[in-house]
Structure formats: structure tokens, C-alpha cells
Amino acid sequence: MPLSEHEQRLLEEMERSLYQNDADFVAKVGGKRARPAYRSIVLGILLAVVGVGVLVTGVLVQQPLVGILGFVVMFVGVLVAIAPGKRVAVDPDAPQGRTKAGRGPSGFMDRMNDRWDKRNDDQQS
């Protein structure tokens, strides 16, 4: 169920407040999602397939040591494939790119946020 516009604005306001008031927490648990490491995924899948092949070969030739080696190779392949990629640090003040108009992608929202913050500061004073 999608959020209403009011709920989206409240969520964005809470997120901004978190970035401004608790930067240490955001730095510790935050960050953009890790980019998937496609090279690691492919290598892990290949290792897992080779490991399954060695495991089956060990069973067919009735050599437990070969089967155990195949299982270990397969297990390492799965671990390599599911290993997380590199995380990207979040800097909420950094520009997030440019649009054709020359402003950041959320220029309108940034102006609205600034106006909201200014209005709140004026009310508190």
C-alpha cells in the first residue's frame, strides 16, 4: 500500500532530522546499499558448480576425501557468491548529481525543506 503525500513528507522530514541530529548513528549503520559484486557472484557460482562436480565424482569413485574436498570447494563458492559488496558512505550534504536544469535532482524538495526548517526556527524563537 503506497504512502500518501502527507506520509511521504513526514517520512522525509524524519529522515532529514535523523541525518542532522544523529550523524554518528547514521554513519555507523547507514550508507547506501552495497553494490552487488558481480565478479564475486560469478566466481562463487563457478566454484559451487565445480565443488558439486568434485563431490559427485568423489561419491562415484568411492573416495571420501575427494567428496569432502568437493563439499569444501562448493561451500567456499557459496560463501564467495553471497559475500556483501563494498558499502558506499553517505554524506547527506554532498550533491547527488545534476539534472539538465543545472540543479540537483531534488532541488525543489531542498528548497521546500529549507523553507520548512526556517519556518520552524522562526516559530521557536
Image (tube, rainbow, N blue to C red):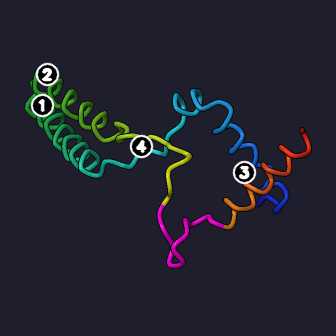
Q: Main secondary structure of the magenta part?
A: loop
Residue 77 in which image quadrant: top left
Give residue 86's position: percent from left, percent from top.
35, 40
Q: Are marks 1 and 2 in contact (CB under 8 Å)?
A: yes
Q: Nearer the viewer, mark 4 or mark 2?
A: 4
**Residue on which disc 3 sits:** 12
Q: In the rendered structure, which amino acid carries the disc numbered 2?
A: Pro
On screen, residue 61 versus residue 45, left or right, reads left
Name which residue lies at 63% across and 39% down: 19
Q: Secondary structure at mark 2?
A: helix
Magenta highlight range = 97-107
113 vs 32: above or below:
below
In the rendered image, the quadrant that contains the C terminus is top right
Kind of residue at disc 4: Val
Q: Are marks 1 and 4 in contact (CB under 8 Å)?
A: no
CB of mark 1 within 8 Å of CB of mark 3?
Answer: no
The residues bearing labels 1 and 4 have C-alpha atoms spaced at a distance of: 42 Å
Q: Earlier in the sequence, mark 4 or mark 2?
A: 2
Identified by mark 1, the residue type is Gly
Where the N terminus falls, by quadrant? bottom right
Residue hosting label 2:
64
Q: Which residue is mark 4?
A: 88
Q: Is residue 98 magenta?
A: yes
Viewer-side label of 1, 3: 3
